[in-house]
Image (cartoon, rainbow, N blue to C red):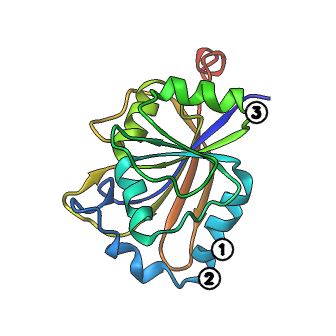
Amino acid sequence: MSLTVTYYVAASLDGFIAREDGSLDWLIPYEDDPEVAADFPAFEQSIDSLVMGRKTYEFLLSLDIWPHAGKVGWILSSKAHKPLAPDMTISRLTPVQVIEAANARGCRHLWLAGGGAIAGAFQQAGLITDYRITYVPVLLGYGVPLFGLGAAPTPLKTVNVKNFSCGLTQIHSQRVLKKESEKGVS
């Protein structure tokens, strides 16, 4: 079975996943919504591994918790950090090396947990298979971009659109494989 790599993230309508300082305060109005609260646990049950960058990990360090018990994790950082769980690797691996390591460990579903620069590197390498982006009806004006410095042109097909009663919209798209793309499927 091949590895599924999903970028599951919330974004403002203008394409930011956090404020410049990393703040997620613009998401607070939605955290108590039962429909929204149920979405992430359902997704997390589907994954067996995750990867994130230094800033996302430092946020978790500030909380002194690892909320992903039992999941294999890679933290991409050049800084030395204390691991919060035994199945975590903190390293300077490239996106391709993370995929190789995940495959070697028998992982089947990797969550690209952030941030934008890491997502951009995985996307530009053609490694993201699924995109589950929940759009929040707010314009931040500036912040951490969805894909860091940008995304490579990639054909996607929409699998599902989920409208939450609180106003959020989640779009689940998948990368179109070359065979499908050549047939004109998008």
Q: Quadrant of the C terminus?
A: top right
Pick whichever, 153 or 102, lies toward us: 102
At 80% from the left and 29% from the top, the residue drawn is: 1
At 25% from the left and 63% from the top, the residue drawn is: 19
Pick whichever, 119 or 102, lies toward us: 102
**Relative to 151, residue 85 above or below:** below
- Quadrant in the picture for residue 29: bottom left
At label 3, counting other C-alpha atoms closer than 10 Å, the crowd grade (few under 14, some 14-19, many 20 or more) is: some
At label 2, counting other C-alpha atoms closer than 10 Å, the crowd grade (few under 14, some 14-19, many 20 or more) is: few
Circles 1 and 2 in contact, beta carbons < 8 Å: yes
**Relative to 42, residue 177 above or below:** above
Whole-percent x and y of residue 92?
Answer: 41, 32
At 76% from the left and 33% from the top, the residue drawn is: 106
Which residue is denoted by mark 3 in the rendering? 106
Q: Which mark is residue 124?
A: none
Whole-percent x and y of residue 46?
Answer: 73, 53
Which residue is denoted by mark 2 in the rendering? 34
Q: Which mark is residue 38?
A: 1
Q: Secondary structure at mark 2?
A: helix
**Mark earlier in primary sequence (2, 3):** 2
Number of residue marks: 3
Q: Secondary structure at mark 1?
A: helix
